[in-house]
Amino acid sequence: MPIDLYYMPMSAPCRSVMLTAKAVGVDLNLKLLDLTAGEHMKPEFVAINPQHCIPTLVDGDLKLWESRAICTYLASKYGKDDSLYPSDPKTRALVDRLLYFDMDRLYFRFGEYVYPVMFFGQEKLDPAKLEKLHEALGWLDGFLAGHDWAVGNSVTVADFVLVASVSTFEVSGIDLSKHRNVTAWLARCKNGLRGYHEANTPGVNDIGKMAKAKLAGK
Ligand SMILES: N[C@@H](CCC(=O)N[C@@H](CS)C(=O)NCC(=O)O)C(=O)O
């Protein structure tokens, strides 16, 4: 039975799921949903996900949204072992912390900074919001110190979630250079994550073009 993913390549949460699927070797049945055309509000999609957001995964009778929950589900159900979402409680807690950190601080602060200008007609970017984003990137820099991947020296779903966010910041013109552990880890992800260039690069390039056009001179 195919596993459907309703998605848009530009969306960072969708790309984190696509990266996870690559890592576990699941061939997703990709169903493009054009948010700009309002396709997510069509009754047939709202019947699947009343919250009408992407990514949305349909695996048999399971209809799942929230990208981080989808990533941990795919890793738990289809991973060849538990390395991507470790079953050891302490290691899993460290992975979970980064998933929540990404949602509640890191990606959230990026959205707070750029979305008002990109999507809601605000004239100017707010430098105080950029400072808050850099504060979160500084915390990420600390989390990444002393090891190759987000949690220790083996890839976990935290890497997929975080890299979907951080690569989006990079192409949107956020200067990452002062966060040395972040830039080194980002390069490692680009070179070392299975399927990175297929699952992440096209969408991130598209959002980068849009962000640069909308944020130029702001
Ligand atoms: N916390 C959610 C956020 C999902 C989200 O905001 N998706 C956006 C696209 S990136 C969306 O579907 N927006 C349309 C809507 O919510 O109606 C996740 O990580 O999956």
Image: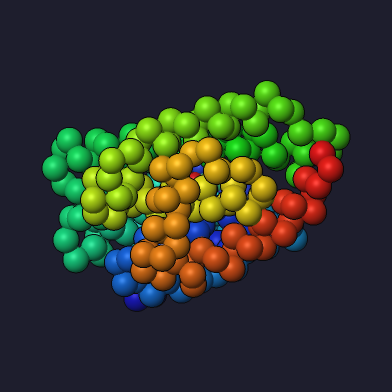
Residue 56 visible? The answer is: no
Instruction: Please state, as top left, top right, bottom left or bottom right, where the C terminus lies in the image.
Output: top right
Q: Which residue lies at the image location 58% right of the left edge and 26% below the top edge?
A: 132
Q: Residue furthest top?
A: 128
Residue 197 visible? The answer is: yes
Instruction: Please state, as top left, top right, bottom left or bottom right, where the N terminus lies in the image.
Output: bottom left
Q: Which residue lies at the image location 16% right of the left edge and 46% below the top edge?
A: 87
Residue 141's image quarter?
top left
The residue nearer to you, when weighing 64 against 167, is: 167
In the visual, does 121 lie left or right of 106? Answer: right
The residue nearer to you, when weighing 98 against 133, is: 133
Residue 192 versus residue 69 in the image, above or below: below
Residue 191's image quarter?
bottom left
**Residue 215, percent across and down?**
78, 45
Q: Which residue lies at the image location 45% right of the left edge and 53% below the top edge?
A: 186
**Colour mapping used in the image:** rainbow
Residue 1 versus residue 67 in the image, above or below: below
In the visual, does 1 lie left or right of 121? Answer: left
The residue nearer to you, when weighing 2 against 131, is: 131
Residue 186 versus residue 106 in the image, above or below: below
**Residue 11, percent across and down?**
58, 55
Q: Which residue lies at the image location 56% right of the left edge and 43% below the top edge?
A: 176
Q: Tally the marks.
A: 0
In the visual, does 193 lie left or right of 80? Answer: right
**Residue 116, percent across and down?**
74, 36
